Image: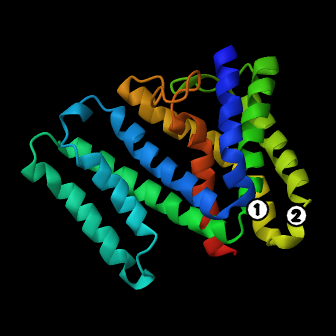
Amino acid sequence: MKQRIITAVVIIAIVFIPVYFGGIPLEILALFIVGAGAYEWMSVHKNVKEWPVWYIPLCALTVLISRFIPSAFMYAYYGFVVALLWSLPIFFKSISSQDSFMTIAYFMIFSLIYQAIGYIEIQHRYLWTICFATYGSDTFAYFVGRKIGKHKMAPRVSPKKSWEGFFGGVIGGFLLSLLISLLYIKQLDLLLTISLCIMCPIVAEIGDLAFSVIKRSTGKKDYSNLLPGHGGILDRVDSLLMNVLLFGILVTLIG
């Protein structure tokens, strides 16, 4: 427990500046998450050690490039990368078709998330709302579920999650993020902000389970041991990444 608390304090200290100020620090944090995410997403699969050394860096690079492709060429770029990753098993015995589809999933998911971070950097205070909605939901869900949780939500994926905890997290995350957002809501789009406060706590719970399914399917408890007592980077930002993806969807529809 002591090690977990120390690690949590260090994490908060590191991410405070990029989350609070945005700009270049946020971009550096995003690049780190994309790179660490590539390593952790791939490393949970059993035959990762057999892959060519360039395979994971290539996947991360395709994500980093995606944000800077002009919109007129976006389809061509996505089509090219998918075709490239899909065809690699033809030429490399160490890369199976399952590996190929798994890396395509990484590219699609993380490139969309990375592009959404670009939208957030235009007005980074949206990230404050997203963070409080996400981790507020996680915190309230934990304490409510621990106190009164009786009905299992998804025992196959996460035996400890309950429906009571889910609804407690959704309500708590909504109220907390709304109260925080009131401090700066005049600088944001009202409809987009309210939508985030309502939807992020729900999507946070789904995101946590979605990332957990991947670990369970490969027999792993954590994505890595990079963060002592906490697992890997993806273990800590799984819900947040799903909500960043949600922000990208909402900002294109509303913003």
Residue 244 x, y percent position in the rendering: 61, 56
Q: Does residue 217 appear left or right of residue 199 in this picture?
A: left
Near-viewer residue (161 or 235)? 235
190 above or below 136?
A: below
Which numbered circle lies on residue 125?
1
Q: Horizontally, is 122 left or right of 146 in the view?
A: left
Above/below status of 88 relative to 189 = above
Residue 77: quadrant of the picture: bottom left
Specify whether 2 is left or right of 53: right
Q: Position of residue 137 (x, y in %)?
A: 75, 39
Quarter the C terminus occupies:
bottom right
> At numbered mark 2, what does the secondary structure look like: helix, strand or loop?
loop
Residues 193 and 168: in front is: 193
Which residue is the site of mark 2? 184
Amino acid at the residue labelled 2:
Tyr
Quadrant location, the N terminus: top right
Nearest the viewer among 65 and 162 is 65
For the residues bearing labels 2 and 1, Cβ distance under 8 angstroms: yes
Q: Position of residue 230 (x, y in %)?
A: 58, 26
Name the residue at 45% across, 31% down.
223
Q: Position of residue 131 (x, y in %)?
A: 72, 48
Q: What is the crowding at mark 1: few (fewer than 14 residues within 10 Å), some, or many (at least 20)?
A: many
Which residue is drawn at the image coordinates 66% and 45% (left, top)? Answer: 15
Residue type at tag 1: Arg
- Whether residue 250 is visible to the viewer of this picture, yes or no, is no
Residue depicted at x 65% and y 36%: 11
Q: Label 2: how many residues lie within 10 Å, few (<14), some (14-19) or many (20+)?
A: few
Quick one: 184 or 80, which is closer to the camera?
184
Q: Earlier in the sequence, mark 2 or mark 1?
A: 1
Relative height, residue 150 to residue 21 (above, below): above
